[in-house]
């Protein structure tokens, strides 16, 4: 029977043989190194296959010649001095024979090998895992850098991923959003139809309305896609939401501007038709007044005339907005603007608003476009009216002001010198400081939908700046609002800017006048008025007939009165053709809507007399008299 030492020796040999066999055939790379010198003492087959070195090459190297600790990796959470000691899995970088760098995880244990203190090392290749993790981090960074809100949720609507774009859009941080449902975070209400389409088709796209954390309404272009596993089963939903809120606002504003432009065009057309209707009424009143002396009849005629003139005034206000902001600058007396505005407000504003026009007798004159300045004051007065739904006091005034250095320093854009300041003050609801900061922004309005475009004050500031002026505003909630509009003045007194007093109108002496208009009532009223006042007439209903008639009777016809807007040959084309027949032809042009470019063209063709429809018999006769005067040539 073997002795105990012999048994122990045999068992040790069997154990070593088993170890060597396991070491050699282990599927993972393993080696044994000397603990002091780090020389390789043994290499298994898997290590040679993995790294490409032969056994002899391995045994001729030390561990630190081809391996280094990955310093970019986090160290183990250990406060001890041997944080990288034995029995610890370490991240390493190993260099293969062909130069390839492997990201590996190593663990080692102390071992006695051939009578030497050694370390047995086992390595696990983590290269591909590291690449996947790096790619995942890169993709996460890319997703976080995206401007869109990118969200991943499970099929129960629980948020699994929430990028920085979602944080910026909705106001919830990722930590706050993860684990909550989208209905809790932003959805107004679950869209069952969209969810059904998503589950059926695997994807869905459309427009959604969400609410941000601070209560803002969001308009989103949303795209949802089902994410499936290897077996094809749906596991989650990828959602990409693009903020379209501002874009939709701009689209709405653009459509609103287009609508306003269309309204302006429509208003011009309607005004043209209304002027053609009102013109014969006003002229016929003068005709009837001359043939009737009955007091009651004359009273009725006065009512008809007053109503027609009031209608003409309303049409003029419509055209004020339709014509835009271009216009000719002339010397104006501000008192007349305020006075006309007071008349219009008295006729159109609610009776519970007390209108108080106020201006001194001596006002300096201003150089400007009467239509534009009228629009400025009317816009301000309309806003004041709307601020007093239950009634109140509306004051419109004008006064002379000398702008000095001190005043100019407190009002950006102000110029030194004399100004006329128009003041529009109400006793309405007033405005908050936040509202006052935005009142001149285009399309900003505090009125209900459909009751304001938000362009009124933006137009006001544009017109005032084009007149080299400036404005100021003061408001207090519950007290009222005051706008002050400053327009540079020429310092001229009222006497130098008084409106020209029309002279007496004398009748004709049988001069032949060609009347051209495509509206029969206007032609008949014109003919009757001219014949009653000593003129003879020919008529034509369009430009072509008028040109042919003038060519035949050019020696007889003293004056042509033509409408501007006619089918076929319009007024401008007719005047141009008449000038070719007779360069000295005398022409009066009438229209319900004179655009600046048209008056410029006609002026270049020698036309000096223009009649704004509707016009009275007196205005017609005065224009005819002026056009036939010797100096008119």
Image: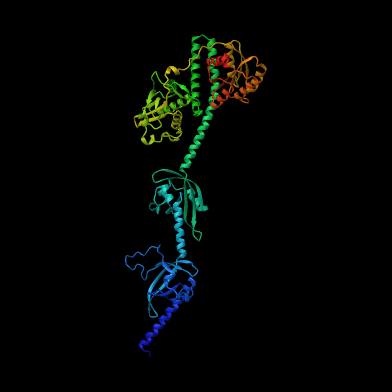
Relative to 199, does residue 356 appear above or below in the rendering? above
Displayed quadrant of residue 346: top left
Pick the residue in front: 193 or 373. Answer: 373
Pick the residue in front: 457 or 576. Answer: 576
Question: Percent x, y for residue 267?
Answer: 52, 28
Q: The C terminus lies in which quarter of the figure?
A: top right
Horizontal side of residue 538 vs 171, given as left or right: right
Question: Percent x, y for residue 323?
Answer: 51, 28
Relative to 629, does residue 427 appear above or below in the rendering? below
Tell me what residue is drawn at x 37 percent, y 64 percent. 75
Question: Percent x, y for residue 229?
Answer: 49, 59
Q: Is residue 433 visible?
A: yes
Horizontal side of residue 591 vs 497, given as left or right: right
Tell me what residue is drawn at x 44 percent, y 48 percent. 190
Question: Percent x, y for residue 336?
Answer: 44, 20
Which residue of the protein is positioned furthest toward the top in this rendering? 293
Pick the residue in front: 132 or 489. Answer: 489
Tell me what residue is drawn at x 36 percent, y 70 percent. 85
Relative to 36, does residue 515 appear above or below in the rendering? above
């Amino acid at each position: 029977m073997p002795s105990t030492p012999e048994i122990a020796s045999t068992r040790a040999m069997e154990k070593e043989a088993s170890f060597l066999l396991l070491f050699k055939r282990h599927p993972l790379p393993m080696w044994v190194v000397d603990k002091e010198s780090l020389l390789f003492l043994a290499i298994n087959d898997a290590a040679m296959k993995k790294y490409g070195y032969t056994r002899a090459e391995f045994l001729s190297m030390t561990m630190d010649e081809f391996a280094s600790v990955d310093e970019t990796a986090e160290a183990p959470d250990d406060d001890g001095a041997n944080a990288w000691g034995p029995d610890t899995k370490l991240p390493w970088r190993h260099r293969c024979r062909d130069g390839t760098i492997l990201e590996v995880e190593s663990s080692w244990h102390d071992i006695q090998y051939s009578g030497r203190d050694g370390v047995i090392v086992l390595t696990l290749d983590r290269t591909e895992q590291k690449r996947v993790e790096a790619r995942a981090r890169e993709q996460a960074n890319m997703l976080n850098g995206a401007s869109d809100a990118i969200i991943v949720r499970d099929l129960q609507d629980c948020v699994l991923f929430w990028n920085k774009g979602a944080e910026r859009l909705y106001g919830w941080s990722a930590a706050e959003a993860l684990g909550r449902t989208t209905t809790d975070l932003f959805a107004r209400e679950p869209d069952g139809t969209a969810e059904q389409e998503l589950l059926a088709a695997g994807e869905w796209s459309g427009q959604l309305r969400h609410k941000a954390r601070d209560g803002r309404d969001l308009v989103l272009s949303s795209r949802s896609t089902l994410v499936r596993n290897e077996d094809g089963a749906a596991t989650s939903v990828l959602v990409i939401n693009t903020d379209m809120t501002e874009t939709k606002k701009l689209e709405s504003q653009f459509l609103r501007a287009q609508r306003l432009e269309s309204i302006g065009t429509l208003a011009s057309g309607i005004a043209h038709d209304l002027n053609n209707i009102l013109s014969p009424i006003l002229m016929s009143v003068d005709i009837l007044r001359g043939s009737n002396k009955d007091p009651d009849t004359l009273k009725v005629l006065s009512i008809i005339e007053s109503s027609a003139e009031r209608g003409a005034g309303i049409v003029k206000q419509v055209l004020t907005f339709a014509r835009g902001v271009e216009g000719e600058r002339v010397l104006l007396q501000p008192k007349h603007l305020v006075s006309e505005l007071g008349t219009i407000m008295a006729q159109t504003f609610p009776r519970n608003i007390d209108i108080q026009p106020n201006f001194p007798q001596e006002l300096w004159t201003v150089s400007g476009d009467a239509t534009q300045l009228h629009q400025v004051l009317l816009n301000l007065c309309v806003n004041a009216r709307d601020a007093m739904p239950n009634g109140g006091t509306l004051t419109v005034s004008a006064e002379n002001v000398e702008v000095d250095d001190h005043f100019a320093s407190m009002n950006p854009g102000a110029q030194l010198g004399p100004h006329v300041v128009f003041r529009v003050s109400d006793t309405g609801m007033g405005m908050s400081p936040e509202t006052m900061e935005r009142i001149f922004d285009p399309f900003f309005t505090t009125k209900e939908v459909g009751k304001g475009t938000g362009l009124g004050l933006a137009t006001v500031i544009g017109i005032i700046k084009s007149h080299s002026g400036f404005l100021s505003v003061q408001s207090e909630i519950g007290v009222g609002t005051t706008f002050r509009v400053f327009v540079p003045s020429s310092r001229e007194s009222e006497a130098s800017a008084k409106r020209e007093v029309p002279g007496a109108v004398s009748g004709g002496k049988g001069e032949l006048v060609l009347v051209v208009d495509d509206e029969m009532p206007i032609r008949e009223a014109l003919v009757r008025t001219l014949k009653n006042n000593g003129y003879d007439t020919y008529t034509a209903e369009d430009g072509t007939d008028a040109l042919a008639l003038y060519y035949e009777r050019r020696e007889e016809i003293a004056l042509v009165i033509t409408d501007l807007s006619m089918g076929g040959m319009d007024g401008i084309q007719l005047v141009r053709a008449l000038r070719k027949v007779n360069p000295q032809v005398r022409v009066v042009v009438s229209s319900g809507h004179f655009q600046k470019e048209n008056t410029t063209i006609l002026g270049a063709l020698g036309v000096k007399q223009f009649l704004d429809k509707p016009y009275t018999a007196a205005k017609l006769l005065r224009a005819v008299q002026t056009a036939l005067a010797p100096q008119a040539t």
